[in-house]
Image (cartoon, rainbow, N blue to C red):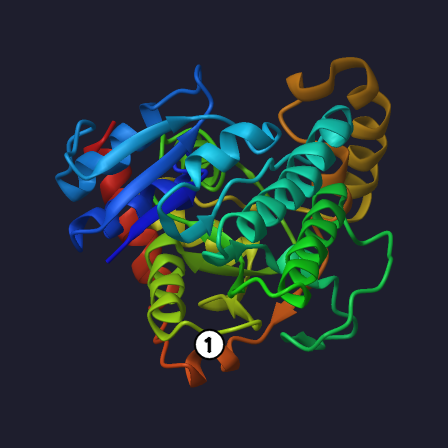
Amino acid sequence: MGKILVTGATGLLGAHLTCRLLLTGACVKALRREHSSLSLFDRVARLYGIELEHPELRWVYGSLEDVFSLEEALQDVDTVFHCAAFVSFYKQDAAAMFRANIQGTANLVNACLRAGNPYLLHVSSIAALGRSTAGEHINEDSTWSDSRQNTRYAVSKHLSELEVWRGFEEGLAGCIVNPGIIIGAGDGSSGSNMFFKRVRKGLRFFPTGINGFVSVEDTVALMLLLWDKKVMHERFIAISENTSYKVLLEEIAVSGNSRKPDIPISGGLYIFLKFLTAMLEPVFGKRLPVSYENIRLSNHMAYYSNHKAQEAGMVFEPLSVSIQRTAQQLNANA
């Protein structure tokens, strides 16, 4: 087994993936910025019984914006798992997010093409597939269309995915995974962990929309399955279930013996919060607890199909199991 490069190893998915790879005996290079925090990785590593100074783990300093650091990181690498992404729904982050997600991915694709064509597994997002209408289930063949229902993050992931498809057309080996909202234990205060944190603190409100969710463990399992098969130039949706935020938050509440959110963000409250965040976000930015985009799309009904992943041999666990395990792991790491 050759060396593996993981981008985004300090984030939720990248950390879980890196730990799983190390448990298989893989030699892993993990790309990180010089001053990035290792706190999330440390928390995840403890769940797997892995030390930060693991003999088969080498942290390499660099960034997706630094082409020279990418070329150095890719030396002697035969597989790249591209998990790094800038995720934000605040307008003030848009320029930096587009630069990191789109140009950063383009830089990595170009570096891979120059470095002897390692196998690239690119982690995209279901957001990159666009939005469904009238209960339609989006699948891997769905066509992107410009819409107000697409967030800036979705646009950035769609355009970054196009860079990967461009690389495939130029001879790059690899495939794409499009995860839903990933549920799994991380630092306890970012990403989907905010659901658990806010419910524990007595969250009363819930969005009325529906989305696709998947555990971090299942996402990693699908990535490793596709990598093992060396699937070429295809994309696969990774979701366990399409479910409402109401059900999600209720199950999180049950997992932590907390009060269930009981006030829907709908009707006049939805209109008021949308107006309020539209007015206040330009002034307070990320100091607001929720963005205008979050509120605007909180009632959207999005459905995704996981049939292709299942046909490839993937078996997804029930979301309730993922939630219960995540709650236990977050409590253990508190």
The answer to whether any part of residue 274 appears in the image is yes
Q: Residue at x 43, y 80 (%)?
A: 310
Residue type, numbered disc 1: Ala
**Horizontally, is 13 left or right of 155 in the view?**
left
Q: Quadrant of the C terminus?
A: top left
Query: Does 179 sit above or below residue 143?
Result: above
Secondary structure under the numbered disc 1 in the rendered image: helix
Query: Does 28 sit above or below residue 33?
Result: below
Q: Nearer the viewer, residue 15 or 272?
A: 15
**Horizontally, is 96 left or right of 235 in the view?**
right
Q: Residue at x 37, y 28 (%)?
A: 60
Q: Quadrant of residue 1?
A: bottom left
Residue wearing tag 1: 309
Query: Does 259 sit above or below residue 190?
Result: below
Q: Residue at x 51, y 44 (%)?
A: 261
Rendered location of residue 278, percent (x, y)? 84, 29
Rendered location of residue 304, percent (x, y)? 60, 71
Rendered location of residue 52, percent (x, y)? 20, 28
The answer to whether any part of residue 209 appears in the image is no
Q: Nearer the viewer, residue 94 or 288?
A: 94
